[in-house]
Amino acid sequence: MLRLFTDKGELSDYIIRGIVSDIVERYLFITNATEIIPDDMEELIKPYVAERLLFYLEETLYFDIGIPICLATFAKDAIKIDESVEIIRIPEQLQKARQIICKYEVAKEDWVAACATHMIVLHNYNYKKDGDYSFDSIMQDYTCYPLEKIDEIFGMIRVATGYHIGYEHIFCIPKDWIYETIADLNAVYGAKSHFVNPKFVKMSWANLPVSFVTEAQCDEIASLYESYKNNVKKLKFPIMRFNRCMLRDEVDDMTTDACIGLESLLAGSTHTEITNAIASRIPLVFSKVGDPKYLATNGRGYMKKIYNLRSRIVHGDELKDRDIYMDNGENRIYIPKMAVDFLRLTLLFMIKNPTYLKVEEIDAYIDSLVLNS
């Protein structure tokens, strides 16, 4: 070891002895070795030596990225999203390892982070040792991970299901190398994040809601992501706004972001009478991917309520109960949530029917219906 790193100038005698100790301990934990030393000991320990030294010898380290999906479980153990992305059930050993590496200071955050049965896996990533930052500092900084791609995938799950899911861990899963390890746990290195709706962090672990994603929804997630990739330029912004809505619980933030997302999809080049423009187009959305809670024929009434709330928010007016809630038959609707639901349904419709990303096509379709009738 000393000879190997003599010219490297990066490791002290103390660190090298620590590496040797790590290798032996790893071997002992994994093999559950007894005090009897086997005759082929040198051969048996070589793989452990190799994976530990590769971290120092390789200029490029290859790994996959895992993102546990909090607050949902899936009907399928594996869902292929595309060639480099999948959703899989988290193996038991990996469940243990990820909890050790990403401990939160607050127990309730740990509870939310632990509440995951499946994870998104992003394949074929690498770290090149030619930057100014150490491996440690990069792996423990969530901003160094591909957050934009991660959020796009979470967006597809949220659009397909309507569930308030999120993520609290991001970690790399090394290929053929290790850095530091604990006992016989899987070698994973990661970062804490905070991308779950804060209302769940306030809950006791026993009250955390876990939503179920059906087989049909699993298939739809993959289908939506494929269509999204083909139209990312037009869908990226409203998906970002929708993700923000799902991670917030404040009336003003939810309503404002939902309205901005709806405008980007349904307003087109309209600069005046936006409420009427959106209200005239959203019935088409309801006719294809409607929600039984909302009547397609009451689109204008819904939009008037949403934009009245938005107007009061942006003008700093005091919000009253009638501004935030509306009666809908026997039901009472929470208007901020209705705005978010409308954005989700519109995204679901647009991703499945990208032709209508041009609002002129929506108007032409509506005009044809009027003429034919």
Image (cartoon, helix red, strand yellow):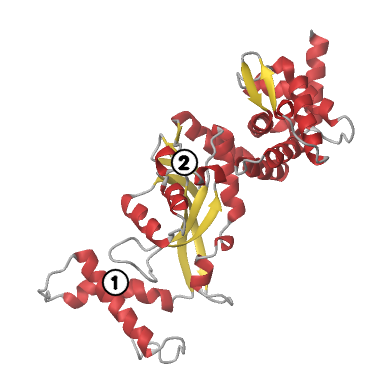
Foreground pick, 80 / 205: 205
Q: Amino acid at mark 1?
A: Tyr
Tag 2 residue? 71
SS for callout 1: helix
Q: Residue at x 80, y 37 (%)?
A: 317
In the image, is residue 194 above or below residue 38? Answer: above
Foreground pick, 307 / 11: 307
Q: Residues within 10 Å of mark 2 (few under 14, many from 20)?
A: many
In the image, is residue 19 above or below residue 183? Answer: below
Q: Residue at x 53, y 38 (%)?
A: 222
> Mark 1 or mark 2, which is nearer to you?
2
Q: Residue at x 46, y 36 (%)?
A: 209
Q: Is residue 66 left or right of residue 228?
A: left
Q: Are marks 1 and 2 in contact (CB under 8 Å)?
A: no
Question: Residue placed farthest to the right in the image?
Answer: 272
Q: Residue at x 72, y 31 (%)?
A: 355
Q: Which of the 4 image quarters holds residue 78?
A: top left
The percent position of residue 200, horizontal first and vertical second, equals 51, 43
Tag 1 residue? 48
The percent position of residue 334, horizontal first and vertical second, equals 65, 28
Of the two numbered discs 1 and 2 on the same chain, state the one appearing first in sequence.
Answer: 1
Evaluate whether residue 82 shows in this view: no
Q: Residues within 10 Å of mark 1 (few under 14, many from 20)?
A: some
SS for callout 2: loop
Q: Amino acid at mark 2?
A: Leu
The percent position of residue 239, horizontal first and vertical second, equals 66, 42
Q: CA distance from mark 1 to mark 2?
A: 36 Å
Check the picture and name the quadrant holding the N terminus. Answer: bottom left
Check the picture and name the quadrant holding the C terminus. Answer: top right
